Structure formats: C-alpha cells, structure tokens
Amino acid sequence: MIIKKLSGHSGCEILLCANDNNSQEKYVRKISPDVSYNERLLTQSQKQEKFTSKLSIIKSPKILRRGHVNNLFYFDMSYVNGKSLNDHIRNSDISTVTPFIKALQDYLSNDKVQNTEDLSSLIQEKVKNTRAKTVGYEKFYDYILGNNWQHIPVSECHGDLTFENLIVSNGKLHFIDFLDSFINTKLIDMAKLLFDVRYFWSSRLVKQKPIVKSIHVDEILKSTQIYKDNKKSIDCLIVLSILRIIPYCKDRYTLEHLERGLEHAIG
C-alpha cells in the first residue's frame, strides 16, 4: 500500500509504503526511472547493503527485498522517520549538532590502512564527459587536470554524502541514497560534505543560511587528517561536483550560485 511519494534528486521514484497486513509497518521503495538505470540502482542497493560502520551512531536503512515492476528494478528498505541533517543544523543549537559532525569526522578518518591508486585516467574521462556538456568553464577543468591524481587513497564510500542524504533519527545518523560514484574514495564524501557546508547546497532556497554553524562544521571537517593530506584533491573534487550539476540548472539563480562557488573553490 502506497502512503505517499517522497522527494528525491536521482530521478528515481521514491515511495513511502505500508505492509498490506499491517499499516504500522512502513518501508520505502526506490524504483529505477528507466530500464537503462536498472544496473546502477542495483549497484546502489548493494552498496547500501554492504555498508557497515564501526561507529554506533551511524546507521543505514536495512535492505528488505529487491525485484522488478514493469521491467524497472526496485528495492525496498526500512523506513527511517527523522529529519535531514540540513534541517537539524538549521533548527538546532551547535552543541546538539556537533556530535553528528564529529561522527562524520570519525567515519571519514576510520580507515587505518589506505591503499592508493592512480586515478588520473578516471578523472580525465569524467572531465572529458562533463566538459562536453558545458561551455565557458575551461579554467576550472584545467584546475582539476593540473592536480596530481597518481596516489589517491581508495576505499568504500557513500558517493553522494550531502546533508540531504543524512537523516537524524533517535540520536543516530542514517546514511541514505548511496550513489555508485565513478571513483571509490572517501575524498568524494569529504568533497560533497564541504560543497554543502561552504556553498549551502541543501539550504540554497532558504533565505536565512546557517552561516555561523557552517563555519563551525567546516572547521571540524578540515581538522581531519584525510583533509590535511589531500586538500588540493578534495578542492578539485568540489569543483568537479559543481561542474557536474551545472548542465542541469534550470534557473539563473541556481547557476549564479554555483558559479560563485566555483570561483571561491579555486581562490
């Protein structure tokens, strides 16, 4: 039984459902937007299912089942009733927010032994594909390609770790909407968080931005060793994240918001 549609940004249909035999047992169904996306959504569900955290404060919804409807892949997951970390930051005091940011700091730093790989060819390919969709951003692509991508720490990652994909519920932080990122490194997760913190992506339509709290969050994240060791690469990934959004901008306000972020990120 479908209760209502939930909002999302991947193009997938996301439904809040209840068990036909027990309306109190709620779950979320995520459905591929088209057949060509089926494989990606399967990979995302597997990534979510494999996710484990050494931190008791960080969880993810349990995968309940997978299947197909009208040739479209779907998976069901447990429903987490809470609010986004973005809303939590805006509406709570700093002392309440800090434990969750510290948990993110620990998550980003908990890989004791990190393998490194040469990601140059993957970055070059992604830049090539993104560049083909935009005009007038050459200096930003040059900034990315000018970085040394030969020794990048690789590990499992969320892939789209923005505040909208973090849910606070019952004192826990839940990771949702995992993404099959083109490279597997927690530098992607750090870049997505800092993109959100510095350029208020999740709060872009809110008039009063949580500026003071964002500065506090930024300082905590910058204090991690992974940031100190990989600052330039993370900054480049922030730039790439912005460039990948630009082709999908539908209004001038959002475009100018992102372009200001680009200038700041390389400044």
Image: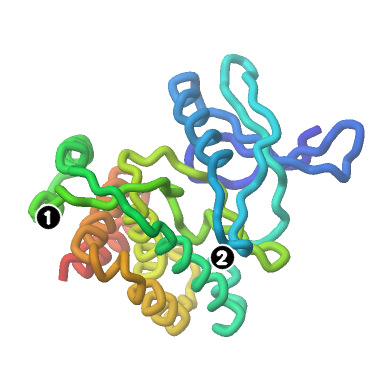
Q: Secondary structure at mark 1?
A: loop
Q: Nearer the viewer, residue 80 or 53?
A: 53
- In the displayed structure, would residue 23 be above or below residue 111? above
Residue 133 picture location, percent across and down: 22, 38
Q: How many marks?
A: 2
Residue 89 picture location, percent across and down: 55, 73
Quadrant containing the C terminus in the rendered view = bottom left
- Residue positioned 56% across, 65% down in the render: 85
Q: Secondary structure at mark 2?
A: helix
- Residue positioned 29% across, 60% down in the render: 258
Give the residue at the far right of this rendering.
21
In front: label 1 or label 2: 1
Q: Quadrant of residue 199?
A: bottom left
Q: What residue is pinned by disc 2? A: 85
Which amino acid, by three-letter code, is at mark 1?
Asn
Q: What residue is pinned by disc 1? A: 147
- Residue positioned 12% across, 55% down in the render: 147
Residue 191 picture location, percent across and down: 33, 59
Q: CA distance from mark 1 to mark 2?
A: 31 Å
Q: Nearer the viewer, residue 138 or 181?
A: 181
Q: Quadrant of residue 134?
A: top left
Dot 2 alpha-carbon crowd within 10 angstroms: few under 14, some 14 to 19, many 20 or more: many
Question: In the displayed structure, does residue 207 sit left or right of residue 93?
Answer: left
Residue 231 can be seen in this image: yes
Of pointers 1 and 2, the one earlier in the residue sequence: 2
Quadrant containing the N terminus in the rendered view = top right
